[in-house]
Amino acid sequence: MAHAAALPARAGIGLKLAQARAILAEPPDLGFLEVHAENLMGAGGPPHAWATALRARYPLSLHGVALSLGADAPLDTEHLERLAELCRRYEPAMFSEHLAWSSHGPFYLNDLLPVAYDQPTLERVAAHVDQVQSRLGRRILLENPATYLRCQSSCLDEVEFLAELARRTGCGLLLDVNNVWVSATNHGFDPFLYLARFPLERVEEVHLAGAAPDRDGDGSPLLIDAHDRPVAAPVWHLFAFVVARTGALPTLIEWDNDVPPLARLVAEAAHAEAVLREVARPLPEAA
Amino acid sequence: MDAAAQAAFAAALLDPEADPPPGLAAPGHADVRRRFAVYRNNVVVSLIDALEARFPVCAALLGPEFFRATARAFLAERPPRSRILFHWGDELPRFLATFEPVARFPWLPDLAALEAARSLAFHAADAEPLAPEALARVSVDRLPAVRLELHPSVVLLRSRFAVVSLWAAHQHVAPAEVEAELAGLDLARGEDALVWRAGEEVWVRAAPPGVHPFLEALGAGGTLGEAADRALEAAPVFDLPAALALLLGHGLAVRLHVDGAPR
């Protein structure tokens, strides 16, 4: 297997195993593929065969959803070993996980649940990130969450919390722009101000996705991070705002539910690449 | 949130009647209850959706509403213990066998076991199938001493009901064809199900008489001779050449050893 290079500063799509055959039959022009690590945790079978064939053709990003870095409990070392085995086997260009918890005791809750932005949580998550980076032998990226509630014990804001985590652990950040829009809408903050304060120099990948509009009890807008539709206009604006400052970054289209035909996903990625080309181009040199 | 707060949060997620735990806040205009319901809904709906995707024939037979209510009850009683979602529902067949509201569908637990076996076979370890002619290279007098190792994906199920036919009927796309096949189905005729993966495809077949004990004996490490004896005891009509053709023609065997012979 080829040595894992960095993810290219292009657009990629989240790999749905149901679309693997279609991609292999007629490989679209994509910067990379991202696959949920947990979907490759079987012993064998088509998922590994497809991932191996796709890995030969595209840079691969491995995205974990179940490590539960924010749980107030020791990391599940069996799960960490499975991740280490996947990193060894596929040499992904990137591994990312979430600032969230998703398990409690023996139970797996299958959602990314909110953490408190306080000192004990900071220390705990930093220790978990250290443990993961040390076991995987690589820097990982940590993704900002989409949230619906905040914890009363939070004394830092999310940007400060993520910046401090990255500073302490040396990890990179995965900036999910849709999550910023969702959380900004749900908590009533300005997403542009959030991004203006975000440690963009730590961002090594961007996620874009669609959110489902809903309503709070009093009728005001509530957004659900549903990954079930195209990227919304406000998210494209926020994305342009980010890459105008960072330059082009590896950018993923996430569409996990009501997944459209492959061509539609590829078109969405092409749109992201157009933004990267137009907005993130380096400033022209002085004549 | 410390461990106690996370415990309270997790418990409230899984209990539809529970109030949100203390310590959570939403902006002034918003209601913490409504916001907490988003998390609860994410957890519950995603996990029920996953069961519906893994057990599509059970869902079709119960109807979406009844299936989802059953899945909800299963989730309340046995939340997932694996972070690997394709294992979510491994315990559903056993749950269904004890869940009173589905007691009038006695075939349901076996049907669910068949559907669970399909996804386990899909993710099972890889192994190169034995070439169909491999057995032909063994001299006839040594055949009874041959041991065949089964592919890691092979699952054998016994049922007092015609669950393979029931499952197969639902593979038709047109509802009229499904109905037509169900109309001619004698559910009380028991079937042994044989599930395995060959290449990228998972196969489901009703095992002919004797094949289930035959494969069970081989799977336990018995010789061909021992396995054939077991099969004939169970079913005097057991057809050994047909069973071997099934085994070798469909990639169910991956290794061959002959007792006393160099490997």
Image: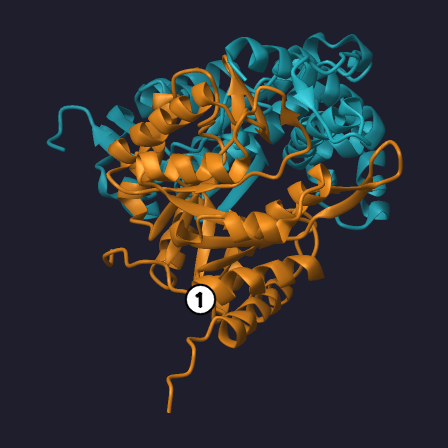
The tint of chain B in the picture is cyan
Q: Is residue B36 left or right of residue B233?
A: right
Q: Nearer the viewer, residue A84 or A54?
A: A84
Residue lying farthest to the right in this orientation: A218
Q: Residues within 10 Å of mark 1 (few under 14, many from 20)?
A: many
Q: Is residue B231 left or right of residue B5?
A: left
The tint of chain A in the picture is orange
Q: Amino acid at mark 1?
A: Ala
Quadrant where the C terminus of chain A sits is bottom left
Residue placed under numbered mark 1 in the picture: A248
**At which x and y percent is residue A233?**
70, 62
Q: Residue at x 72, y 28 (%)?
A: B26
Instruction: Relative to A37, say whether B3 is above or below.
Output: above
**At which x and y percent is residue B228?**
40, 22
Q: Is residue B57 left or right of residue A282?
A: right
**At which x and y percent is residue B257?**
22, 30
Quadrant where the N terminus of chain A sits is bottom left
Q: Residue at x 47, y 14 (%)?
A: B233
